Image: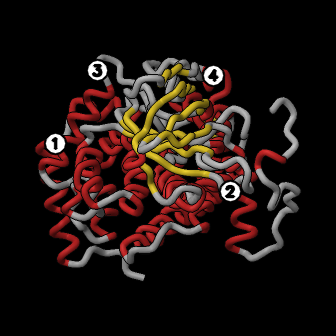
Amino acid sequence: MNFDDTPQEAAFRASARAWIAANAPVELADELGRVPSGRFQLKNRDVVQVSCAWQKKKADAGWACLHWPKDYGGRGALPIERVIWQQEEGVFGRLGAIFAVGQGMCGPTLMTYATEEQKRGLLPKIASGEEIWCQLFSEPWGGSDLAGLRTRAERDGKSWIVNGQKIWTSGAQHAEYGILITRTDPAVPKHQGLTMFFLNMKSPGIEIRPIKQISGQSDFNEVYFTDVRIPDSQRLGAVGNGWNVSLTTLMNERMSIGATVATGFPELFALCCEIETEEGLAVDDPAVRSRLATWAARASGLTHTTYRAISALSRGERPGPENSIGKLVGGTMLQEIAAFAMDLRGAAGQLTDPEHPLGGQFPSMLFRAPAVRIAGGTDEILRNIIAERVLGLPGDIRVDKGVPFNKIPTKGR
């Protein structure tokens, strides 16, 4: 297998590299290289403003959402060009975290189900970072059972009235728009009575409450809906077909998370080449080398699984259940690597101050890991998906299958 660039790919890489060198916020390179995966804060800059400025600059020059059609704000690029761009953007790609939901999950859903007028009006602003989007799916009572949601939408002429609550909504406090899945018919089985919409997050009746995380940040939010009115024109897909619409979002979400999760392996390898143990450098310890080899193999597998998924997207295919593999492996790997690195450092591994030479990075990764393993489907859900839909194994017993939602016994309903 030849991984060398073709002449065309080399020319594309040179063009991307030159543009990044001339336009990237290089003064932030060192700080971005130290921040953990996921959303983060900058020491002396507003990360939202910096991220929006970088995304807008990329869009104006034709480097945003490369794989999207040109009419929707992209470049119509080849899959390999998308990979090359990600390689060259490097640490500056972390400034795209705040747009991950909009570009990786909401955008593909809009491309599939929105009207052409809506696509042309909404997608270019998502690509350019002018509008941040969120995904309103999870609920406090549902756990991992998305189809068990209770937020309801009731028809009122040419509009719908929404009441209920969502939770763990990433970036809702910054979002201008969101996609929302609701229950519109409780008298049919739970997967059949759902309908999807998109809505303006500044609509009357929406209340957003940030959730404080163990890291001290508030990336997630509770969102309350009280008589929120949504025009029927903002419905995505048919009434009652929301579950099928949501699958487009969920498959793209799992692919997006699996493709972008920073496993921490490069940082761990660098640490092992620097840190001294009682026997010498950590990397010279056979036990450490064995762990590194295992994680190196997994990291390589994740990389090439992502490339395969990108190639499938280029053929117009919807991300399939096999993309659950990347998120399942990546999230677990992040947690294992962070814990191992902290153990290697001993007492210094507990330091959380990013300004300290030994502090901050791996504890932040460890704090982030549980969220990665839950967002977009828990490990248990993903294992079921892989077992049933990839390997063809018998499905779990589901006692509520075919039962109308309002007839399912639930304590407290």
Residue type, label 2? His
Residue type, label 4? Gln
Q: Which mark is residue 412?
A: none
Residue type, label 1? Lys
Using the numbered discs, state the Cα–Cα distance from disc 2 to disc 4 in whole angstroms: 45 Å
Residue type, label 3? Arg
Using the numbered discs, state the Cα–Cα distance from disc 2 to disc 3 in whole angstroms: 44 Å
The answer to the question of whether label 1 and label 3 lie on touching residues, with beta carbons closer than 8 A, is no
Q: Nearer the viewer, residue 392 or 293?
A: 392
**Residue identified by numbered label 4:** 350
Which is in the foreground here, disc 2 or disc 3? 2
Q: How many tags in the picture?
A: 4
**Residue identified by numbered label 3:** 45
Q: Can residue 98 be seen from the camera position used here?
A: no
Q: Which mark is residue 191?
A: 2
Using the numbered discs, state the Cα–Cα distance from disc 1 to disc 3 in whole angstroms: 17 Å
| Residue in view at x 75 percent, y 76 percent | 392
Judged left or right of residue 380, residue 221 is left
Which is in the foreground here, disc 2 or disc 4? 2
**Residue identified by numbered label 1:** 57
Q: Residue 257's x, y, as percent? A: 51, 50
Using the numbered discs, state the Cα–Cα distance from disc 1 to disc 2 in whole angstroms: 42 Å
Sequence order check: which comes first, mark 3 or mark 4? 3
Q: Nearer the viewer, residue 373 or 44?
A: 373
